[in-house]
Every structure is written in C-alpha cells, then in structure tokens.
Amino acid sequence: MTISDDDVPGDAPRVVKAQREIAAPAGVIFELIADPANQPRWDGNDNLARAADGQRVRAVGDVFVMTNTSGRVRENHVVEFAEGELIAWKPAEPGGTPFGQLWRWELQPVTDGGTLVTHTYDWTGLTDPGRFKRARSTTSDRLAASLERLAALAERGSAG
C-alpha cells in the first residue's frame, strides 16, 4: 500500500492519497463505491451513517444524498465519472454549493485479475476556515482504512 500527503506550503496537506491493490475485479469494487447505500460499510473515516437505496451513480451531474454520523445530510455532486474506472464527488448542504472538497476513486485493472485502487481527498478548493479542522483530520491513514474495509468487502464478494 502506498500512502502520500502532498503538502501545500504553510498549511496542512491539502491533498491526501492512499493506494492499494485489491484482489477483486474493478467492477465489483466500483459497485461498492458507486452505490452510496454501500459506502457506510467501508468508510474509514467513520463519518457516514446511511444513504437510501436506489441512488447508484451513473454519470457526471448525478447527486446522491448521505446522512453522516452526526445526523447532517449532505448532497454529493458527481464531478468525474467513467463507469468501472473513476468516480469523484463534492459534498454540499442540501440545495447548496459544494464546500470545495473532492473525494476521488480511481480503479485500474492489474494483470492478475485484481485492481489497483487510488483514493484521494483533495481540499485545495475549500475556502471556509470553519471546515479546515475536519478537512485536516482526513488523513492518508483514514483513506487507507477505507481501502482496507473496501478490500475486505470486495474480496469476499468476488470469491467463489
């Protein structure tokens, strides 16, 4: 597993990443990410409580709704999407403009049938200082925890 923090001079890391090879096909992994109802099962930040069924992401411009563990509802605006390969979203309050953080997942098949998964949290666009503390707490270790949980689910789901 590769973990990295790209530092912004004079500030905490604003782009954090974790990468891991998962012994499952990209399609299996992508379903766990693109269907928001699955996300609380693998969230390494322990921030996601629930999402309604039927919100499977299919394109840029889709919006899915999550409730976090503190009871706040977030609309997640999909800004990058390639089926089975890439998905990224920006959270916002319901009816609001995205705060500026970007959550990205990139999946690359590898020769043994597994998938190299890169998870990125980028808060370079975040301008509200009141959100900086929470953003700083999202470290590459937390992203790696999400990858570990995702791997456990995907590898179990693709076995057999």
Image: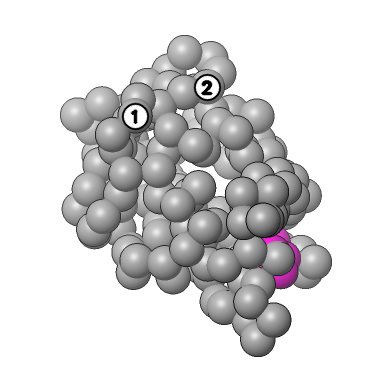
Is 151 in front, or is 99? 151
**Side of 36 relative to 113 (left or right):** left
Is 1 in front, or is 74? 1
Q: Which structural element holds mark 2?
A: strand
Residue 77: x and y in percent read 29, 46
Does 147 appear above or below 43?
Answer: below
| Residue visible at 65% across and 72% down in the picture | 114
**Side of 93 relative to 62 (left or right):** right
Q: Amino acid at mark 2?
A: Ala
Single out the residue that lies furthest toward the front. Answer: 160
Residue 101: x and y in percent read 45, 48
Q: Which mark is residue 53?
A: 1
Residue 100 shows in the view: no
> Quadrant of the rendered structure where residue 159 is?
bottom right
Q: Amino acid at mark 1?
A: Asp
Residue with the mark numbered 2:
49
Give yes or no for residue 20 being in the magenta stretch.
yes
Q: Tell me where the magenta segment starts and ends, as one range.
A: 17-22
- Please state, as top left, top right, bottom left or bottom right, where the N terminus lies in the image: bottom right
Single out the residue that lies furthest toward the top. Answer: 71
